[in-house]
Image (cartoon, grey):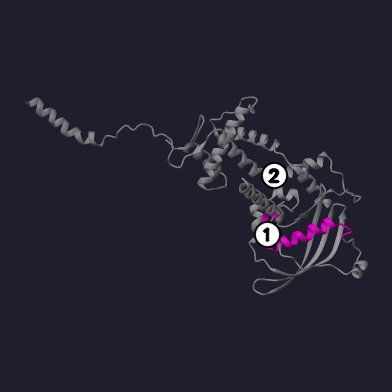
């Protein structure tokens, strides 16, 4: 009887501790932002990119952070797929690796972007003063001038080339951007 | 059978007539210097450049007629402009302000800068929707690429190209 009473007394003392003891929670899974063929993009990836951007003076909306995180990841995946990282030195699991790989893919995108002849020719013919020599004659449109005009076009088109590339890769990798429904 | 054939012919007729309609803009009152004044001007005029004159007149008729789709106007801009400027942005530029009623567009001179690049100086007399009369000067540019004349927008701060 004494023994039973002792056990009850011990339980009485310990019971508040048992009640308030912190439950051991399983590690929380990061929120999934987008999902595709062998690709899962989490909120952690977005936050990492956001932190990197906000170290500087730039800020943007949450929607844009998500968009650019997805773009970085898909461009990096495609750079790996195409073997653009010849030395295989870039690690896709790190932000800096994704950024470098993504840049490689962007170079490929702009290099393969077709700027039509009439675009280059019309720019050249519409700006005769830009191509005048010291003697006042207009320089013939050589490869150097063509290259210069092509680069001007590409600078302005960069964002639309990027967006078109992103859309194409979203389709290729069947990427679905989650709006609360991805598990 | 004959009835079906008749309907088919009718449909083709409607389609063909639709194709030939094109875009009709309200005519614009464009005036040119008299032969006498042209003689005194140290500039080249159209020089028989009927294709340029036609394109120029069509462009300005389209420009001030809000019933004409902006796409038609956009396709008349130089190819480099079409490539570098977003069409929706161009639409804002062309159609978002108050569109005046053009009373007269006086072509003052046509300058041949190069065989494929012309400058056309204009005086525009217009009435704004609130009744205000306006008189402005314009320098308009045109380029010939692969045999076709295109309008050129140069140094407009709205378009950073």
Q: Is residue A46 left or right of residue B8?
A: left
B81 in relation to A103, above or below: below
Residue A19 image offset from top left, x and y in percent: 23, 36
> Can I make out residue B1 in this image?
yes
Q: Which residue corresponds to mark 1?
A: B68
* Viewer-closest of A167 and A60: A167
A183 in relation to B50, above or below: above
* Viewer-closest of B65 and B24: B24
B75 in relation to A158, above or below: below
Q: Quadrant of the N terminus of chain A?
A: top left
Hey, which residue is sitting farthest right in the picture? B39
* Viewer-closest of A27 and B115: B115
Q: Secondary structure at mark 1?
A: loop
* Residue located at (73% from left, 45% from top): A152
* Residue located at (64% from left, 50% from top): B6
Disc sitting over residue A118 in the figure:
none
Residue B85 image offset from top left, x and y in percent: 69, 50
Segment tinted magenta in the rendering: B46-73
Residue A112 image offset from top left, x and y in percent: 70, 35
Q: Which residue corresponds to mark 2?
A: A155
Q: Mark 1 vs mark 2: tell me if same chain.
A: no
Q: The residue marked by circle 1 belongs to what chain? A: B
Mark 1 → mark 2, Cα distance in angstroms: 32 Å
């Amino acid at each position: 009887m004494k023994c039973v009473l002792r056990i009850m007394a011990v339980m009485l003392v310990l019971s508040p501790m048992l009640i308030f003891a912190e439950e051991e929670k399983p590690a929380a899974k990061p929120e999934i932002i987008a999902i595709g063929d062998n690709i899962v993009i989490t909120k952690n990836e977005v936050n990492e990119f956001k932190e990197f951007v906000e170290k500087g003076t730039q800020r943007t909306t949450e929607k844009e952070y998500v968009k650019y995180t997805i773009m970085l990841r898909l461009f990096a995946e495609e750079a790996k797929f195409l073997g653009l990282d010849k030395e295989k030195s870039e690690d896709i699991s790190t932000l800096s690796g994704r950024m470098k790989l993504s840049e490689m893919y962007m170079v490929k995108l702009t290099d393969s972007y077709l700027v039509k002849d009439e675009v280059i020719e019309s720019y050249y013919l519409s700006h005769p003063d830009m191509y005048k020599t010291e003697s006042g004659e207009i320089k013939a449109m050589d490869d150097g001038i063509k290259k210069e005009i092509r680069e001007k076009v590409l600078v302005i088109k960069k964002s639309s080339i990027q967006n078109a590339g992103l859309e194409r890769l979203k389709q290729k990798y069947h990427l679905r951007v989650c709006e609360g429904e991805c598990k | 059978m004959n009835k079906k054939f008749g309907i088919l012919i009718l449909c083709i007729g409607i389609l063909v007539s639709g194709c030939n309609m094109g875009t009709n803009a309200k005519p614009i009152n464009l005036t040119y210097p008299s032969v006498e004044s042209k003689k005194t001007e140290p500039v080249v005029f159209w020089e028989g450049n009927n294709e340029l004159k036609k394109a120029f007149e069509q462009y300005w008729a389209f420009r001030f007629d809000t019933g004409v789709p902006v796409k038609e106007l956009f396709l008349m801009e130089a190819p480099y402009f079409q490539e570098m400027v977003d069409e929706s942005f161009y639409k804002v530029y062309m159609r978002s302000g108050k569109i005046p009623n053009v009373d007269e567009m006086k072509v003052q001179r046509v300058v041949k800068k190069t065989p494929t690049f012309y400058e056309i100086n204009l005086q525009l007399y217009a009435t704004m929707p609130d009744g205000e009369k306006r008189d402005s000067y314009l320098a308009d540019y045109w380029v010939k690429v692969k045999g076709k004349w295109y309008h050129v927008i140069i140094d407009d701060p709205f378009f950073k190209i």
